């Protein structure tokens, strides 16, 4: 059944038919007809943000924590350009986002009209696909296709640019089922011959390891379940990238912790020394591999990825398998069971003995203090006081992000939202709001650094307006901690522009926004402060004054292989005394 | 002394190895890319090449199936074997791309390019240009008493050779279409 309606009404109808419940957006001249339609209905909730970048990060938090696409509505020109960082972030981390942007009327395109920008041109390299709709009759089908492209295959952000006259004009509405989507149908089943070759290697491997990534999370909860079954049945150790945390539980007995530049010693050493590496939905990012030439030199490598362009992009693999991680794990399990559930028990026992030796290094140890709050200690206490709850964690970007990944344990997928690929400071606060909107009753905590947090702090207004009780856990070292760490280690201790002067009083800031706030600087008061934050009925900013010169270890320096990690007590103290006096 | 044993005050250290270690292994490939003829599809393909630092040596594009809204983009590119593979995979995942064929590895193919050459001169040079054009089977598509415009079709090598010969004979302008290519056989 086809129906005539205006383009603006079509947008709202298409969103409803796609099951959209929430739109994050900001009105403006070129989207007024759509806002008018939103005003006249009650099915779709609109979250008014304070800046369009915040809208996209909220949609990302919503998408990562639910598995559903996040939807954003922005106006033309600055509305669209402000969304670019979020789009790029979602592209790098494979997050399904649908952005609808207004555009000047078709007859004004190209005239440098007010608030005109070449939005499809600007967003072409930072979306999975984008469309400029010039005909109202094409609008509904394009929106349905956009949802299809955003969610199928490797997920990603898409954008639909809708000129204002197309919103006003009438056209024929097409329901989702009638929209053509046959052209874009990525392959989900892996090649069974390649899977069998992988299983053969799994049966004899002496030092195997699972290296998992965000692909497992994107594949859906079933993939995480199958992964757990596979790991527990084979007894192989498992490590994960930043993006994949939670797919296998941190309390699982085969868990080695995160790998990579700030990954755990045992995880990186096992990656370096393994003889069979099974990459499930990760992409050999440079933060993972270190020096390519020395990356896991003695292993056979299998790589399961739904995106063919990820395979052999960085690391040449022996067994490439294009397919959805969930489907492929299911087939691996089937073949492995049918062939008699064989593993090399003797080899595995020796391998685990070696791993236990590495664990004894206790790579996350740090020098505790009873006078000043160590950032690691703050996260250990946060973990202790919240781990029994079904909590959601977002982060900003920097040292605090790595410490959060190291010290917080994730038991389930979709509970950890962080900007991995793009490393977007300012991601965490809006993302936490998006998560909270999707899970109104849940405990949602943004682990932040003060510098990152300030980048999108205006969104506290959104949190207060929509009663999203997000908890902002700010590890305040009055520094751009990761920049400072690199300057100390790599740039001769010249701390160029890496400290924060004129920081706001975060407690007064909380008061100004109309939410709760507190400051804590004594380790003895930390637990009470965390409890106050959790128990507060509403959004809360906790300003945790931490050690200013703590470095994040372990660290694989850039351009070094996995087995040349820097560990905790590496001579940081001398460095601080020599160069840091002026800063303290 | 910092943890990396870099002396205080030493110069900065790049995080990455910036050299191309495989520069000498580059090979030339001709790719045929079948795409939906929709707005911006060429920009998408070109943007992919510039954004990821791939080379374009030649590029032609035109609609080949009006009914089916299909265009064929022929790209000649250079890179190491792994870069060529990556280019094909990256092209393949663009939503409007239907097919990517590497004509260089998928069996024999014919490659042709059309070019127009304007040669200005009189006397011996003019006669020599016309004589060479006959040898290369170039057609004269415009002539005045002082000039010829030759039309020549062939492989890029043949057109390069013709250009080299025309240069001392008064070559003033060249227009080349870039390579069009098809696989041989059924």
Image (spheres, rainbow, N blue to C red):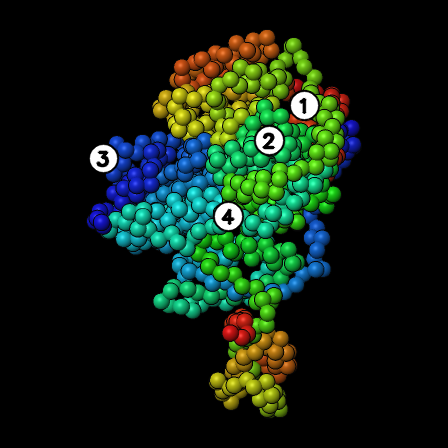
Q: Is there one chain holding both mark 4 and mark 3? A: yes
Label 1: few (<14), some (14–19) or many (≥20) C-alpha neighbours in 10 Å: some
Q: Nearer the viewer, residue A228 or A391?
A: A228
Which of disc 2 and disc 3 is earlier in sequence?
3
The residue indicated by pointer 4 is: A189
Which of disc 3 and disc 1 is earlier in sequence?
3
The residue indicated by pointer 1 is: A364
Q: Secondary structure at mark 4?
A: loop
The residue indicated by pointer 3 is: A40
> Residue most toward the left?
A4
The residue indicated by pointer 2 is: A232
Q: Which residue is drawn at the image coordinates 58% and 39% (left, top)?
A: A337
Chain to which the residue tagged by mark 3 belongs: A
Q: Is there one chain holding both mark 1 and mark 3? A: yes
Q: Secondary structure at mark 3?
A: loop
Q: Which residue is drawn at the image coordinates 56% and 82% (left, top)?
A: B119
Measured from the top left, where is residue B179 in percent x and y? 54, 71
């Amino acid at each position: 059944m086809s129906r005539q309606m205006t383009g603006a009404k079509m947008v709202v109808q298409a969103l409803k038919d796609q099951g959209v419940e929430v739109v994050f957006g900001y009105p403006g001249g070129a989207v007024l007809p759509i806002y008018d339609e939103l005003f006249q209905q009650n099915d779709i909730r609109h979250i008014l943000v304070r800046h369009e970048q915040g809208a996209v990060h909220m949609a990302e938090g919503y998408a990562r924590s639910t598995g559903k696409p996040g939807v954003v509505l922005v106006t033309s020109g600055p509305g669209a350009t402000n969304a670019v960082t979020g789009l790029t972030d979602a592209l790098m981390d494979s997050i399904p986002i649908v952005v609808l942007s207004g555009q000047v009327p078709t007859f004004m395109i190209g005239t440098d009209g007010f608030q005109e920008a070449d939005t499809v041109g600007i967003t072409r390299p930072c979306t999975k696909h984008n469309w400029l709709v010039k005909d109202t009759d094409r609008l509904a089908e394009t929106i349905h296709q956009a949802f299809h492209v955003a969610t199928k295959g490797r997920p990603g952000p898409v954008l639909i640019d809708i000129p204002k006259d197309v919103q006003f004009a009438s056209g024929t509405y097409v329901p989702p089922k009638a929209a053509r989507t046959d052209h874009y149908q990525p392959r989900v089943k892996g090649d069974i011959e390649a899977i069998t070759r992988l299983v053969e290697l799994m049966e004899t491997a002496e030092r195997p390891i699972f290296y998992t990534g965000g692909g497992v999370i994107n594949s859906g909860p079933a993939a995480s379940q199958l992964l757990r079954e596979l790991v527990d049945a084979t007894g192989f150790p498992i490590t994960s990238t930043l993006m994949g945390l939670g797919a296998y539980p941190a309390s699982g007995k085969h868990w080695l912790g995160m790998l990579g530049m700030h990954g755990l010693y045992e995880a990186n050493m096992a990656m370096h020394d393994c003889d069979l590496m099974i990459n499930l939905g990760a992409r050999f990012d440079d933060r993972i591999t270190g020096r390519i030439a020395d990356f896991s030199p003695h292993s056979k490598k299998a790589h399961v990825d739904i995106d063919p362009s990820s395979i052999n992009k960085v690391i040449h693999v022996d067994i490439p398998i294009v397919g959805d991680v969930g489907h492929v794990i299911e087939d691996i399990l089937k073949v492995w069971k049918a062939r008699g559930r064989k593993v090399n028990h003797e080899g595995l026992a020796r391998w685990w003995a070696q791993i236990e030796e590495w664990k004894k290094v206790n790579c996350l140890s740090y020098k505790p203090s009873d006078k000043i709050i160590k950032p690691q200690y703050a996260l250990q206490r946060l973990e202790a006081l919240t781990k029994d709850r079904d909590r959601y964690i977002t982060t900003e970007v920097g040292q605090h992000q790595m410490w959060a990944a190291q010290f917080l344990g994730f038991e389930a997928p979709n509970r950890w939202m962080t900007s991995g690929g793009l490393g977007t400071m300012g991601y965490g606060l809006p993302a936490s709001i998006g998560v909270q909107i999707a899970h109104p009753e849940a405990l949602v905590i943004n682990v932040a650094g003060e510098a990152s947090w300030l980048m999108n702090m205006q969104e506290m207004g959104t949190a207060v307006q929509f009663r999203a009780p997000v908890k902002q856990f700010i590890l305040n070292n009055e520094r751009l901690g990761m920049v400072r760490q690199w300057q100390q280690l790599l740039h001769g201790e010249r701390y160029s522009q890496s400290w924060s002067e004129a920081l706001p009083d975060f407690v007064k800031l909380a008061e100004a926004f109309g939410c709760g706030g507190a400051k804590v600087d004594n380790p003895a008061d930390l637990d009470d402060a965390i409890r106050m934050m959790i128990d507060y009925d509403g959004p809360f900013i906790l300003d945790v004054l931490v050690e200013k010169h703590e470095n994040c270890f372990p660290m694989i320096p850039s351009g070094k292989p996995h087995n040349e990690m820097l560990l905790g007590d590496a001579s940081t103290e001398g460095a601080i005394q020599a160069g840091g006096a002026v800063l303290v | 002394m910092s943890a990396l044993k870099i002396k205080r005050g030493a110069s900065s250290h790049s995080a990455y190895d910036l050299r191309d270690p495989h520069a000498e292994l580059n090979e030339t490939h001709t790719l045929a890319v079948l795409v939906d003829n929709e707005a911006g599809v060429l920009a998408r393909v070109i943007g992919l090449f510039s954004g990821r630092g791939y080379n374009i040596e030649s590029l032609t594009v035109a609609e080949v199936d009006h009914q089916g809204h299909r265009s064929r983009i022929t790209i000649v590119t250079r890179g190491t074997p792994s870069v060529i593979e990556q280019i094909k995979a990256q092209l393949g995942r663009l939503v409007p791309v239907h097919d990517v064929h590497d004509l260089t590895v998928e069996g024999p193919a014919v490659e042709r390019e059309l070019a127009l050459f304007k040669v200005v001169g009189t006397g011996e040079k003019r006669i020599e240009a016309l004589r060479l054009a006959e040898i290369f089977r170039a057609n004269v598509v415009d002539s005045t008493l002082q000039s010829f415009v030759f039309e020549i079709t062939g492989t890029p090598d043949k057109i390069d050779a013709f250009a080299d010969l025309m240069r001392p004979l008064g070559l003033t302008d060249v227009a080349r279409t870039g390579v069009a290519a098809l696989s041989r056989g059924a």
